[in-house]
Each structure stands twice: as structure tokens, then as C-alpha cells.
Amino acid sequence: MYAGDTVRMNVTSDLSETATVHWHGFHLPARADGGPHQPIEPGGSWTARFDVRQRASMFWYHSHAHRRSGPQVYQGLAGMIYVRDSASEALDLPNDYGVDDIPLVVQDRAFASDGSLIYSTRMHNVMMGMMGDTMLVNGIVEPVFEAKSDRLRLRLVNGSNARFYRFGFDDGRSFHQIGTDGGLLAAPLPTDNVVLAPGERAQVIVDVSDGRPVSLVADGLEIMGMGNMGRRMRGSGPMRDSDRPVDNWMMGDRGGRGGMMGERERRDGMMGERERRDGMMGGMMDERRRFTVLDIRPAASRRRAIAMPRQLATLPQIDPGDAVRTRRFVLDMGMGMRMMRGGGFTINGKSMDMQRIDETVRVDTTEIWQVENASMMAHPFHIHDVQFRILDRNGRPPDAAEQGLKDTVVVYPGETVRLLLRFEDYTDPDLPYMYHCHILEHEDAGMMGQFTVTA
Ligand SMILES: [Cu+2]
């Protein structure tokens, strides 16, 4: 779709259970959002009509059914949406869909020997989120792409239920990140890796003019950690701001895995003996495995690359002084018995309640949302309706890779992340938008809240 279009999305359900379709990343009226308040019954249909008030980027849509997002997305209720605009099309960037502009929706899945999907709601899969040992890319296994151009634009969506990835190339080549969730960065960012949590997106440009086959790979990241470990998990590229010494890093071997064994053993100790003996579970649970996302084979004859633009976009100004108030959101997971009873996933001590509006925001205002992670796991925090900016992480400015428009932000254990949000255009006194953890099993278990935007 193009910025400025008015679209009508007609959804008909042939499913046997209630589902929804949420337009992830879109700024739209609450009634068109496709959250749990817009259920589509079996055999029923739903129409969302909205104006495309987005910058060019890749967005996606997926089920957001009440307490059923995890299993429904896992079984396939997700897809992607390109939004285009004239500003981005005027740039010398690969823009030929399927030729040099390739969407890659990345989802790990577990299959039984008969080929059926395995979705487990055992305690461990609720706590860590559901992971699989097979990588699906746009729904297929082990895709191969023949590159007919020297430069490729790859649009990555982490559509996994729970797994975090660090993307890079198997030969370590550097590339440029050009976009975040909601649009282009101000300028191309040279790097050798991109970290995406569930719900996050990135656009990258890779040069294959050397003619050598290369694979895009994704290393699964361990998301259980004891405070401040997040800094270690992000960015190992030479260009990252995170290369600055951070005094509270626990261990010096950034990017290495050696220091994590103690943590891993401790975590494995939380599993039952039965689960540990289960070989299938062992495979799925190894968060640290490497997946091949895309084998790229440059064709003998290729379109030549043109120079990379030096500037990409003008981002909206950020001024925390514009904020009329600060709201605090504390993410937490009860452990032990509380977790087992399913009441442990909370924001500000409360589990999701469809009947409760947690926050009421005034339209045409700017706010700071301060998100704190009191748990031992990283959580990707997603907010509907707005593309926000990250002000700081524990008081430090975000890495360059996070300075663009975002709708999902990872908050690592012990971290406080401040976001700047502008609420515009749409009001509804009754129908809320959601904010939640995008580990879908956490969302389903209650790590979600509701806000309205009112006149
Ligand atoms: Cu979470």
C-alpha cells in the first residue's frame, strides 16, 4: 500500500476458533486495530478501514486473539505488508520486489515426525516462550535465492513467538542497516549484525558483487539473564555505540559464550528430569543454535549496483521537554508456584483484563513511557497505534541501530528504557489499544495492558 491510501481490509475466517487480525505497527483507529476487541468468529468476517498514515517500511499482520495469539500465530496466522511512499522511492535503493527487494519473515517451529506442528504449553514453554528447531522463512525451509543484482535489500521480520536472533552473514561480511520497525534510518548504518526480538523488523542492504555464495544466518540468543546482561547480547559489530565500555557488564567476553555456562546450568536446573530426557525438547530449547535463513547465490550476470545514498530520511525531532507526563510500566514474571498457577505475567503488578482500561491518554499530546524490567528475562515491549522513539536505556542514548522509528523495543533484565510517544488523529473513549510483551506466550499469559486515546 502507499502512504496516503485509504484501504479496506476484508477478513473472512474459515477457522474453527475465534481469531483476530492485528495490523502491527500501523497508526489507525482503535476499531480497526485488530486486537482482542475485534474478534472474528468462525465463519464470520471483519472489515478494517483506515488511512495509511505510515512512512514506507515493512509492517506485518498477525492474530491477536485473547489468550490465543501464541498458538494462532504459530500455526500460520501472520503475513507482511509493504508500505511505500514517494520519499523512499526517490532514493537509489533496491526497490524491485522479489528481485532485489526481498522480504524475509523468520519463524522457528517444531515438527513431529509426521510433519504436524508441535505447540507445547508446558510450563517451560510458557516461561521461555515456544521455540522450535526448524527455521521457516516466508513459510518454507532452507530457501535459496539467486541474486540477479549486485545489491540486495533484505527486509527482516522476527515473526517468531519467542526467539531472539542476531542476524549476520556466514562469512562475516559487513552490510548496511537502513531501516527499523517503522521506517528508514536517517543514514545507512555500517554493521555486521542486527539483533531482532519477536515483533521487531529491520531493513538491510548487502553487497554480493564479489559473486561468491553467502548465507544470511541467525544466531539464537539466550534471553534469560541476571540483570544487565542485555548489553552483552546486543551488537558485536565494530560500528556499534555499544562498543563503548559499559561499567556494569558482568563479563568481559562480549559476544563469547564462555561466561554464560553457569547461567545456563542454573536455568537447566529449573527443568524437570522428564523434560530433560525428552530429546525433542532439548533441541527446541537450545536458544543459542545457529539457523541458516537464506542461501544467496549470485547469478553469473547481475544488475550493477549504484552508490548507496548518504542520507535516507529526516526523522521527527525528539524533545523530551514536549512530554506532558511520564508513565511507568514495570514488567514482571512471578516465579515458582505463582508461575505454575499462571498468574505471574504482569505489567505494574496486573495481569491483562479485557474489562479494565489501564491508561487513558489525551490525543495531541506527547508522553514519556518508562518501561522497567523487574524479571530475569528480556521482554520485547510492543505498543499499538504509535511509532515511538527510544530516549535512553538506563540513561544512555540508544545504539544507532535503535534511533529510528520503533513500535517494539527490547527491555533487558534490570533495564529501564524511556520512550517518547506522540498520540495523534484518532480517539475512542471506549475501545482500547494494547501494550504488551511480544513473546506471544507471555502476552497470552497476561503480560499486557490496555490504553485509550481520548479527546
Ligand atoms: Cu515477555
Image (spheres, rainbow, N blue to C red):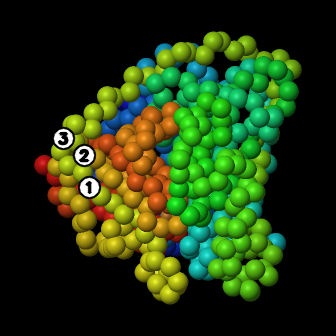
Percent across and percent down for residue 328 are 30, 58
Q: CA distance from mark 2 to mark 3?
A: 10 Å
Percent across and percent down for residue 132 are 70, 64
Q: CA distance from mark 2 to mark 1?
A: 8 Å
Residue found at the far front of this picture = 247
Which disc number belongs to residue 367? 2
Q: Nearer the viewer, residue 375 or 438?
A: 375
Which disc number belongs to residue 364? 3
Amino acid on which disc 2 is placed = Glu
Q: Secondary structure at mark 2?
A: strand
Amino acid on which disc 1 is placed = Arg
**Decide: marks 3, 1 in contact (CB < 8 A)?**
no
Q: CA distance from mark 3 to mark 1?
A: 16 Å
Instruction: Please tell me whether residue 432 is drawn above or below residue 123 in the rendered image.
Output: above
Instruction: Please tell me whether residue 38 is drawn above or below residue 444 in the rendered image.
Output: above
Instruction: Please tell me whether residue 133 is drawn above or below residue 58 in the rendered image.
Output: below
Point out the image quarter for the N terminus. Answer: top left
**Decide: marks 2, 3 in contact (CB < 8 A)?**
no
Percent across and percent down for residue 321 are 22, 37
Question: Is the CB of the residue bearing disc 2 within 8 angstroms of ligand 1?
Answer: no
Name the residue located 39 percent from the left edge and 45 percent from the top edge: 395
**Left or right: where does residue 222 sit relative to residue 304?**
left
Callout 3 crowding tier (Cα within 10 Å): few <14, some 14–19, many ≥20: some
Is residue 76 visible to us here? no
Mark positioned earlier in the residue sequence (3 or 1): 1
Q: Nearer the viewer, mark 2 or mark 3?
A: 2
Q: Label 1 belongs to which residue?
A: 327
Name the residue located 49 percent from the left edge and 17 percent from the top edge: 311
